[in-house]
Amino acid sequence: MLRAIEWIVLGLGSAAAIVYGVRRHRPARIGPWLLLAGAIVASAAGDVLTALNRPRVADVCFYAMFVLVACSLLQLTRAGAVLVDRARLIDLLAFACSALLVVWVFVIGDEDPIGDVSGAYVIGALLLLAVVARLLVAVGRNISAVLLVIGAVGVLVSDIVQPLWPGRLSESGFVVLYLAWGAAALHPSMVRLTEPAEPRQSPWLARWATLLGISVATPPVVLLIEAVHGTVGDGVVIAVASAITILLTITRLTDAVSLNGQALTRERGLRQASAALVAAADTKAVDEAVRAAIAQLMPPDAVRSIVFAVDDRQLTLEAVPGPEAGPPTRSWWIEDVDSNYATLVCPLWLEPLAVARPSGGALILVGRRDTLTAARDTLGVLAGQAALALDRISLVEAVGRRDSDLYLRAVIRNSADIMVVIDDDQRIRYASPSLRELLGADDLPPLATLDDLVHPDDRDQLRQALRSSGDGVVFCSLLRADGSRAMVEATYRDLREDRLVQGFVVTMRDFTQGHESDEQLPQRDNLDELPAWVNRRSARHKFRY
């Protein structure tokens, strides 16, 4: 009775440690750890029943323990988990299970020294050890994975030694199992075992398919051989091995069908998005096409928000990879306070076409980390297609603006009117020849702005006028090449929303051309709008008379 109480304390304590570790560390998926806690409870119940001398009921608990452990490991190694690809692991496990069955039935099973050892338990423990060892190899130096391996080794040793030499010492492997698995859940590294990873589909090769088929066919063949030669003495072992191989085969086929379905969904979504992006004529149409594609590619509740910014100036993110991060990537992560959520940033630029649209931009999604991780490559491709569509639209608009500028230049080449076309940042895109004549310069400096031509006293006034939306008139003075000033009346039109212009069109009228400056001053009602130096000259002129 005392031994039964000890098993109860160990089992419940280990299960409670796992539940506490899940609540404390909040892994991406809690299902595998809760199944592991259930397996610990089932194993403890089997040990209690064994201590109370009820072996048949205890066997049921031990089998339930292996089923729960198998379900937990299937969750830990599913597509998008830390293993990335478990297809080869499943094929090797199925073959190992069949090989162990053959060895147990035809080589070891009839030997007297180990006749009391349960073949089903040993096969299950070996497969458990193989899976957790593969997990350890996948995650590297991970304390939780090491503790899971230690627990699996303890189970295997006790399953072999305990039937041969019953006693507390031979049962210590089960104690190691409870302590190690409970400690594995308490360590912070347990979160790493359920972190999402990008799934990778393995090609279906004939040799692996043949190996899986042989593994499934082995248990029935062993059963047939035993039935032909007389009494079936290893029926339980054969049934367990057959159930394991069938479960592994179904899991393998389910993974293949699921990954193939996901690939078809991604291909269909990207094909439809590509067609919509090719037909898009403006930025709004590109935005709508991208959002429609994301709605088709992603589960409805997986994404919290979507930001489609076509200009880096619209972004406030600071977690952009620096030059030390190496070559630019198609996407990067920004961590969230909640470990289950994250922000995925996919830049909207293509290096060969960066000159066509240097403003950049990004597609930013905030949602569940596991879903975004699984769709990261797809979203990167979608962002690249959107960037290509935006570059195409920018190039078409640039060609249209060039043709418009050429037409404007041809029309007003011999006109005395001064006309300037400036971008949103006041950079001069086109200036009529009469402006160069007014300034007395052969040509304007490369990448010159309107600020460079205006007198410093009038720059703030000009910036304030152009910063506001709409049309208007501003009086300012330009600096000639010889240092003198030319007072002009600048009438500007805000055509930034016009697809062919996308800027300001400024028409200037020179007040001083062919006359004295004081004779061509505007009416006194407009003096408040004039440059400061003109107001001072007007005041002196009025005082003189």
Image (cartoon, helix red, strand yellow):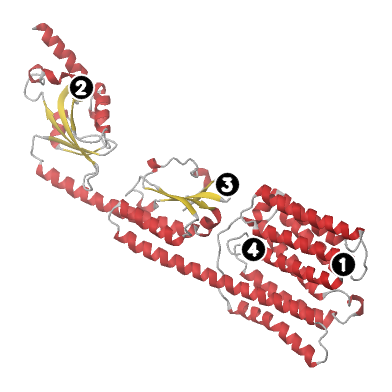
Q: How many marks?
A: 4
Residue 164 coordinates in the image, percent (x, y): 91, 71
> Do labels 1 and 2 touch, CB within 8 Å?
no
The disc at residue 75 is 4
Residue type at mark 4: give it.
Gln
Residue 389 coordinates in the image, percent (x, y): 33, 56
Instruction: Give the spatial CA distance, label 2 vs label 4.
Output: 78 Å
Mark nearer the N terminus (1 vs 3): 1
Q: Nearer the viewer, mark 1 or mark 2?
A: 1
Circle 1 SS class? helix
Per the image, the residue denoted by label 1 is: 50
Instruction: Give the spatial CA distance, label 2 vs label 3.
Output: 62 Å
Mark nearer the N terminus (1 vs 4): 1
Specify whether 217 is left or right of 406.
Answer: right
> Do labels 1 and 4 touch, CB within 8 Å?
no
Instruction: Give the spatial CA distance, label 1 vs label 3.
Output: 44 Å
